[in-house]
Image (cartoon, rainbow, N blue to C red):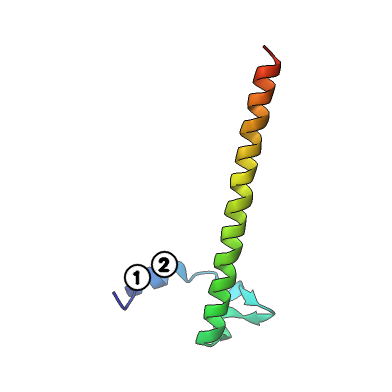
Amino acid sequence: MNTIPKHLIDKHKEGVEALTFYGVPVTELDRDGLLAFANLCAQELRDMRSRFLGFIETSRALNEATRIKSR
């Protein structure tokens, strides 16, 4: 699939006017700028996911330690 249906693009482009990449509105970026922006967003999402999973792991360990301690 080389094209994205227009209805999907229209559905997800709302609010993009407020996004900037190093102070430049995303709507004014060229292809390379958009790719850089997308790459940065993807990296930030991976980092947030990693931190969230670490939080969950820590919470489970604390809950388990609390459960064992309260026996």
In the figure, is residue 36 to the left or right of 71? Answer: left
- Asked if the residue under mark 2 is in contact with the one under mark 1, i.e. CB atoms within 8 Å, the reply is yes
Determine the residue located farthest toward the left in the rendered image: 1
Determine the residue located farthest toward the bottom in the rendered image: 30
Please state the horizontal and vertical placement of residue 37, each as a whole percent of the image: 57, 76
The answer to whether 63 is drawn above or below residue 15 in the figure is above
Please state the horizontal and vertical placement of residue 67, each as a whole percent of the image: 65, 19
43 and 28: which one is in front? 43
Mark 1 is surrounded, within 10 Å at the Cα level, by few (under 14), some (14 to 19) or many (20 or more) other residues, namely: few
Q: Which residue is mark 1?
A: 7
Q: Residue at x 61, y 32 (%)?
A: 60
Circle 1 — which element? helix
15 and 57: which one is in front? 57
In the figure, is residue 3 to the left or right of 41? Answer: left
Q: Residue at x 66, y 37 (%)?
A: 58
Please state the horizontal and vertical placement of residue 30, each as a whole percent of the image: 53, 88
